Each structure stands twice: as structure tokens, then as C-alpha cells.
Image (cartoon, rainbow, N blue to C red):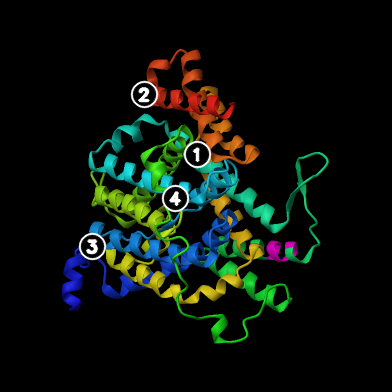
Amino acid sequence: MLKRVERFFRVRERGSTVRREAVAGVTTFLAMAYALFVVPAVLSETGMDKEAVFVATALAAFVGTMVMALYANMPIAQAPGMGLIAFFAYTVVLGMGIPWQTALAGVFASGLLFFLLTVTKVRETIIQAIPHELKMAVGAGIGLFIALIGLKNAGLVVIDPEAGLPKLGTIHEPRTLLAVFGLLVTAALLVRRVGGAVFYGMVATAAVGMLAGLIPVPKGLGDIVKPVPSIAPTLAKLDWPALLHPTPAFVFIVLTIFFVDFFDATGTIVAIAQQAGLMKNGKIEGGGRALISDAVATMAGAWLGTSTTTSYIESSAGVAAGGRTGLASVVTAGLFLLSLFFAPLLQIVTAEVTAPALIVVGVLMAGNLRHIDWSDLAVAVPAFLTVALMPFTFSIAIGIAAGFLAYPILKIVQGRGREVHPVLYGLAGVFVAYFIWLAR
């Protein structure tokens, strides 16, 4: 049996062992386990059932990661992405007032679009059409947006009721101090390069919160483990009519989710493939299958009742531990399935516990800023608009629209309009229509 597993995943061929793959799978799970608690915490603000979202998140991670393992044979795990849960919850549902059922339909449609463009190989054209700096700006802007949410949940940033502007919160408030403690612990673990730093930071914050009486203490095994909650409140609750009769707002939501996931997934898969030594002659071994797996995971996640499921850069922790094949992903998927029985822990993971995770994820994503050429203002201005408007307008969509609209305009003014791909001009037209729709 063991030899069959080795042959199927080509473990020895890739210079690994079954034991090493198992360790890598556990390492990846610990590095991204925070998603199990952060995703339900964020999506529950839209009115979605928190326990049902927890189950949907765990199942989406299990399905997506297992597809990646069996179909693509890649050591990459999948789960609902941090940037896209923020877009789903705060821009689409709470910002635009669109029901979460319709937003789920948008997620499903974006996954389907991703799948079709991957199968037909159109994705390469789109990837080449979008300037590298704009891709980096989108990631960095979403990072700042997520960090702002974390700072707000921590109580470090509040809105001044008189000026209507953000200001420093009451930092001596116990729950804020707990979040600050969590942030420092998580940052310290990251600095020490501890695998699973974000997850361990959440555990430490919750433990201190319980000792301080700020978080309820589990009274028995029943407060830690119990039968799997019902997924019925979110399962297959997509707004199907919205798919058949899309409005301009719905189309824009689909395109935004698609582009963010498209760039995020592609960048992650390329980075992990390079780290794992799976890049040969500039091509990823199983790269097309990996992108198809990502698209399938998005559609499955939407049907289960969670936001866009995508490839996690935290998979790099497992690769660093020796993971080279999909066997590592099988182990990670199995642990996500096992986690279904730990839904009671959602009561322990409060906003103060998840806030440090959001802030730290924002810090990591903001690292994309170093890849932008700030000396070329025709690039720097659109990139800055993309990055700045996301947190300042509390809308990921507006940031993307502004940057993608400004770029071709400034390139034309610069006399280099021919360098802009026709696809980008087409997108600029879509974003003009979006701003006209917003002004109605």
C-alpha cells in the first residue's frame, strides 16, 4: 500500500519520503489553521451563520486541498483567502448592500470564469496584459485594507464621531491591550521564523485572555469538541437568478473577485513551485492542473457557503519542511476535515484574538510595495491610487478600478500608450461604467 502511494505521488522521484511529506502536511496546516477562525469571524458580520461558515470553510479547505493533491500533485493547500473575505464582507455585502447569497453567486461565477479561461489557456494573455506593478499594488492595497480591519477590531483605531476620521483608540482598555499583546507575540514568532506563527499567536492570545477573564473558559470537553454543526444555513444558498440575469454591479463583483483570485493564485503557485523545485525551463510541472484545482475549489467553496477558496502562500512552510508532492496536501486536507469537530472553539476566538492575525497578514501582503517602480510616475500614481483608496474608501473594488483606469490614461499622456495591452483598455472601459453606475 505504501509503495502504491509513493508511486502515485512520485514521492521518491521528487527526492522526498512519505514521512517528510507527512511532516510537511502538518506544518502547512498549522501555518494556515488561523483561517478556520478568522473566516467565520469576518463572514458572520454579513449575517451568515458563524458555525455553518466554520463547517463550510473546513470543508472547502478539505475539498480544495484534496483536489490539488490528487489532480495536480502539488504541495499546495487551499482555503478561503484573506483578501477576498474582506472584499466579500466589507465591500460587497456591507458596503454595496448586496445580500450574501448574491455575493456567493458572484464567487461561484468567478470560479467558473477562472476555470474556463484556464482550460482554454486564455489566462496567459490576461496575465501578460496586466502590468506587474498593478498586480503588486492590488496585493499591497488589500493588505492595508485587511490591516485596517484588524486595527479596528483591536480597538487601536476608531472613528472620531465629530471629525468623521480615524484616530487612535483607547489603548489602556483591557481588550485592546490583549490584542496588542497578541500582535507582539505573533510578530515575535514571525521574526524568529517559527512555523505556524500566526496560529500560535492566536492560541497565546486566547490563553492570556482566558487567564485575564476577558474570554470565556471552556468548562469541559464539550466546550472544545462536539458533533459537527449543521451546514444547512449556507449550503447551496447561492442566488441562482443573479447568475442568469446579472446586473452591472454583479458583473463588476464577479470580475473583481476573478482578477484578485487570478493574480493571487497564479503568484502563489509560481512561488511555491519555484521553492519546491518544480519549475523547469520556465514552466511549472502541473501548473495548469494547479490553476484548474484552484478554480474548482472556488466553485466548491461558494456552493458550501464561504468566500473564494484559493491557494495559500503558507504552503511554503510545508515546502520548507520538505514537502514536494501532493501527499503533503493529503495530510493537510485530512487535518482540515478533522477540525470540523472543534467548532466550539469559535467562542474562544474573539475579535481581539483574530485582530493580530489580520494585522500581520496585512503586513506580509504590503511587502508587494517593494516591487513597484516609484521613480516612474505613470506607474507610481496608478499604483498609489490602488493601494491608498482601498483602505481610505473602505472598498477594494474602488481601489482596483481607480488604478486600472489611471494607468492607461497616464501612459497615453506619457506618449507610451502603445505599450498598454488592449485588454487593459477594455478593463478601463468597464471601470468607467462602474464609476458611472456608482454615481447614479
Magenta range = 176-181
x, y percentage for residue 238? 42, 52
Q: Sort mark 3 into few (<14), some (14-19) or many (20+) by Cα contacts within 10 Å.
A: some
Query: What mark, if any, has residue 402 been given in the picture?
Result: none
Q: CA distance from mark 3 to mark 1?
A: 34 Å
What residue would you read off at disc 3? 14
In the image, residue 159 lies in the stretch drawn in magenta: no
Lower position in the chain sequence, tag 4 or tag 2 = 4
Q: Amino acid at mark 3?
A: Arg
Q: CA distance from mark 3 to mark 2?
A: 39 Å
What residue would you read off at disc 2? 421
Residue at horizontal 71%, vertical 66%?
178
Q: Nearer the viewer, mark 4 or mark 2?
A: 4
| One can see residue 254 in this view | yes
Above or below residue 98? Residue 355 is: below
Secondary structure found at label 2: loop
Lower position in the chain sequence, tag 3 or tag 2 = 3
Q: Sort mark 1 into few (<14), some (14-19) or many (20+) by Cα contacts within 10 Å.
A: many
Secondary structure found at label 3: loop
| CB atoms of marks 4 and 3 within 8 Å | no
Q: What kind of secondary structure does the magenta stretch mostly adopt?
A: helix
Lower position in the chain sequence, tag 4 or tag 3 = 3
What residue would you read off at disc 1? 138
Q: Amino acid at mark 4?
A: Leu
Q: CA distance from mark 4 to mark 2?
A: 31 Å
Quadrant of image for the C terminus: top right
Q: Nearer the viewer, mark 3 or mark 1?
A: 1
What residue would you read off at disc 4? 104
